[in-house]
Image: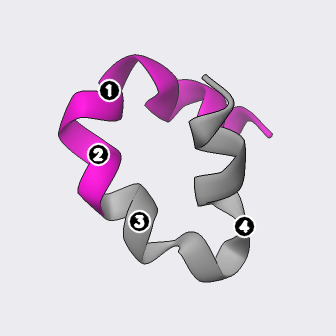
Amino acid sequence: DNFYMELKPQATCNFRCIVSFSNSGIRDRFYEY
């Protein structure tokens, strides 16, 4: 999804936000990077 692709370069800034979305499964995809 373009949603997490756009957040990829901002992982350091949005890392905490991604954790809050762990219920959506986005966190698991983020850890792949």
| Residue kind at label 2, given as amino acid type | Asn
Assign a secondary structure to mark 4.
Answer: loop
The magenta stretch spans which residues? 1-16
Amino acid carrying label 3: it is Val
Question: Which disc number belongs to residue 25?
Answer: 4
Labelled pair 1, 3 in contact (Cβ < 8 Å): no
Q: Is residue 4 left or right of residue 17?
A: right
Q: Is residue 19 above or below residue 24?
A: above
Which residue, as the protein is rendered here, is positioned at the far right? 1
If the image is split into quadrants, where does the C terminus sit? top right
- By secondary structure, the bulk of the magenta-drawn segment is best described as helix
Rendered position, 32 above or below 18: above
Q: Residue lying at the far bottom in this picture: please name it.
A: 23
Q: CA distance from mark 1 to mark 3?
A: 13 Å
Q: Secondary structure at mark 2?
A: helix
Please, what is the three-letter code of the amino acid marked with disc 1?
Gln
Q: CA distance from mark 4 to mark 3?
A: 9 Å
* Residue type indicated by callout 4: Gly
Tell me what residue is drawn at x 46 percent, y 33 percent.
7
Q: Which residue is mark 2?
A: 14
Q: Earlier in the sequence, mark 2 or mark 3?
A: 2
**As displayed, is residue 16 above or below residue 25?**
above
